[in-house]
Amino acid sequence: MKFNIPLKTFLLGGLASQITEARPKEPYTELYRPQFHFSPQKNWINDPNGLVYEDGTYHLYYQYNPGGATWGALSWGHATSKDLTHWTEQPVALLARGFPDNVTEMFFSGSIVVDEENTSGFGRQGRAPWVAIYTSFYPMEQTLPSGKHVREGQQAQSIAYSLDQGLTWTTYDESNPVIPEPPAPYQDQYLEFRDPNIFWHQQTKQWVALVVVSKIHKVLIYNSRDLKHWSLASEFGPVNAIGGVWECPSVFPLPLDGGKSTKWVMLLSLNPGGPPGTVGSGGQYIIGDFNGTTFTPDLDSIHERSAPEGSVIFQGFEGTESYADRGWVATGDFIGVSPSVGTLAGQNPVTGFLGKQLVNTFLNGDSSTGTLISPAFDISHKYINFLVGGGSNLNKTAIRLKVDGNVVRDAAGSNSEHLTWQSWDVSSFQNRSAVIEIIDNATEGWGHISVDEISFSNSAAKNEEANWLDWGPDFYAALGFNGLPPNQHTIISWMSNWQYGGVIPTDPWRGAYTVPRHLSLKTIGQKARLVQEPAGSWKAITRGGKTSTFSLVDGVRNLGQIGKAIEINLVFSDREPSPTGDSEFGIIVRATKDLSQQTRVGYDFATQRVFIDRTRSGDISFDDTFASIYSAPLSPSSDGTVALRIFVDWSSVEVFGGEGETTITAQIFPSSNATYGQLFSIGGKTENINLHTKEIRSTWR
Ligand code: FRU
């Protein structure tokens, strides 16, 4: 076997002999410093990378800027743990090439495998190499040591290896990048091609890599025998949530219902376009099967985008006829025009429409204006449903319903190229004659509208777009550990959001990870669902523990000072919602004595949703969208109770609802005297409340 001679190695401080378990010198007591979540001593982090378990040690690599607390000079930081709870920061594993003065290559997200059989040939003297695959981001055009030429801003997949169990790494400069660009017909997507995830597929005895072509919502699946040569096997997507770019794909097997069968689960991050009610980043999962080359989703894991069953399609804009030929009156720039085929030149991809064609008024860019008026029709059903995207200004880019010449309903996009369903309840206009009008009189700044699938139905169309991994705003780039058996699959996510991740008020670090979460699949309500539970040595870091059982009539119960880092287990009976007004039960955490600061975690009996309300959670000033309420569906369990397990830290709240089928994760920035707690019951009596709180000790001291 031939050995490759690296042109450049990143040896930081020489070949370190062993991974140390020294505690950090810093006390980790700054305001907002996570006490039982990983955060670096200083500087910026985003996605977790290369999670791998080997020889009793969990390795966490991550997107890291060695030069400061904002995104830049992306390198791979490294931390290790024996128990997923106590972490030790290690030397930087892959330092941005040319750092600090002339960065020519950054190391974006990726993954690591232990190459036990030395398929790569990087091994020496019987030592199994660890191989990392990552996205090389090249800020400038250049010819690489391998002789390959890359363009400015190109993203390509490269590898590196380690012969000392992940401490120091050698980039494979002889040949990098090993996947230089996206295949035909996606070559023009070389600026958005990233986040390789690799694993060994035992049944077919080969390596598998997933890479996303982010903007067009495609996962490319590659195979390899040696981790160096990759061939494209299949592609997957777009499906379900596509409201932003796709990032950080992965796929892995998980036992269903305790091991009766095994299913494969794909994770995808997307930004923006996270769960309803959030702004910015989020994650989704899709359950299916994987045979080493192809991922086949389960039908009930894919959300149909079609109109509700029994709909009458009024206009789907398919086919080549012009608007006029279909009986529509076109004015302005739309005269003589036909519906558009997907994306028009110079525009970001339009997504979420059905079939091949749609109305898209981005003709001569935003500058085109005009109107499209449908033929008259009689209102025959309760709802008119349609897909709409583009500009949000109702006066400029809108779809309208006119009855007797008056506008009675209107709708617009939300400054996004993604079309979503909107519905008009038109029951009060039954049997009246109407027309639909699409207007565009804007010439710049989201000065266009997209419309598709105008249809009549007796039910409103729903935007059930995804299986959300977590319903909160701060759960991104989830990644699982390689090296663990399927029944121990554990993920870690970046506990932040691209919307405000760069301006959160922490210093001298920025960014933290969620508690590691063990994943499994359970059939709940006749559907396989992903279930999460916190992983780690909780017993070692929790102390005290008070349990009490009681009822609470409309009102509050003060809990006094419950602390800043706490685990709360709260179980209570479901109840009939009050016929008038709100019906909620929950707990206030991280409150100041006067409650001017508080974070509410509760359950709404009317909507059967669990929520985190961080509108008064402390410092909310750094981003307009931060002060919000996030909610997620959670059915009571079969015994009629609702269970919430809540982890509160100095700057975060994570809620695990039910058996863990619903989670919500949110950052909060309360002041240091926000240590009080209170229970609340609104709109009725909550019974059989069982409250158990435990203090969580710092893992850093
Ligand atoms: C996701 C991401 C990845 C990329 C990395 C760069 O958060 O945008 O797609 O590899 O961050 O830091």
Image: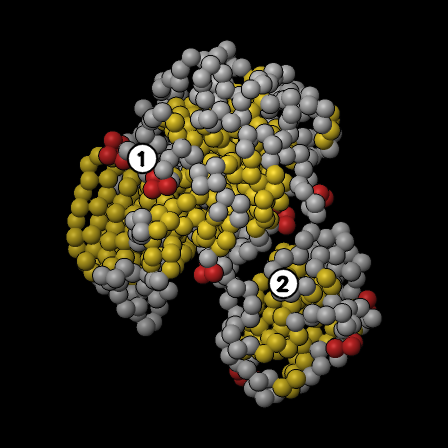
Q: Position of residue 424 (x, y in %)?
A: 56, 74
Q: Quadrant of the N terminus?
A: top right
The answer to which image quadrant residue 114 occupies is top left
The vertical placement of 482 against 352, above or below, is above
> Mark 2 near ligand 1 (CB under 8 Å)?
no
* 417 with respect to 292 (left or right): right
Q: Amino acid at mark 2?
A: Phe
Mark 2 or mark 1, earlier in chain: 2
Q: Quadrant of the rendered structure where residue 499 is?
A: top right
Along the viewing direction, whichever of 623 and 302 lies nearer the viewer:
302
Residue at the location (56% across, 35% down)? 224
Q: Is residue 585 left or right of residue 99?
A: left
Q: Position of residue 554 (x, y in %)?
A: 25, 62
Number of the label disc, if any, that sits on residue 353: 2
Residue 183: tell me if it is visible: yes
Residue 196 position, x and y percent, is: 55, 37
Reading the image, the residue beneath label 1 is 536
Residue type at numbered disc 1: Gly
Taking the image as shown, residue 517 lies to the left or right of residue 319, namely left
